[in-house]
Amino acid sequence: MKKVKFEWDENKNRYNQKKHNLLFEDAQYAFADKNRIIAKDIEHSQDEIRYYCFGLVGTQVLTVRFTYRENSIRIIGAGYWRKGKKIYERNNKIFR
């Protein structure tokens, strides 16, 4: 099995930590959830295609915004967002 490589801009990582209290190093774990959901970011208007990963990390659903660059997943932003939690729960048929 090929190991997945993650990368990010360190300035964005520090900004994300201040804004959402979450480091990109920790955001990687959303991709390890076997029930994770990957969705295309249809609102992104730049040339690069972007995606969302909704995955369970510990007891919370984490939303990670990312893109693919060469052989890496480049993390752009991450947080515990209500919309991502709703998408995850609906697609995994979790009702609370």
Image (cartoon, rainbow, N blue to C red):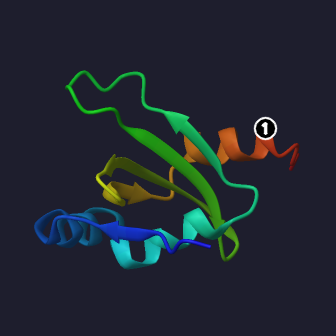
Answer above or below: position of 72 versus 43.
below
Which sits in the foreground, 34 or 83? Answer: 34
Q: Is residue 21 visible?
A: no
On screen, residue 27 versus residue 72, left or right, reads right
Answer above or below: position of 38 versus 70.
above
Which sits in the foreground, 89 or 5? Answer: 5
On screen, residue 59 versus residue 80, left or right, reads right
Asked where in the image residue 36 lies, by quadrant, the reply is bottom right
**Residue at the image point whose x is 38% and y is 78% from the top:** 25
Answer above or below: position of 78 versus 22.
above
Disc 1 marks which amino acid?
Arg
**Residue at the image point whose x is 86% and y is 50% from the top:** 96
Q: Is residue 95 visible?
A: yes
On screen, residue 44 versus residue 89, left or right, reads left
**Residue at the image point whose x is 70% and y is 46% from the top:** 88
Asked where in the image residue 29 lies, by quadrant, the reply is bottom right
Could you say where residue 65 lies in the image, as x and y percent from the top left? 39, 48
Could you say where residue 95 lies in the image, as x and y percent from the top left? 88, 46
- Residue occupying the far front of the picture: 1
On screen, residue 91 versus residue 2, left or right, reads right
Could you say where residue 56 lies in the image, as x and y percent from the top left? 67, 64
Could you say where residue 41 lies in the image, as x and y percent from the top left? 42, 31
Q: Give the residue at mark 1.
A: 90
Which element carries disc 1, helix, strand or loop? helix
**Residue at the image point whose x is 63% and y is 58% from the top:** 55
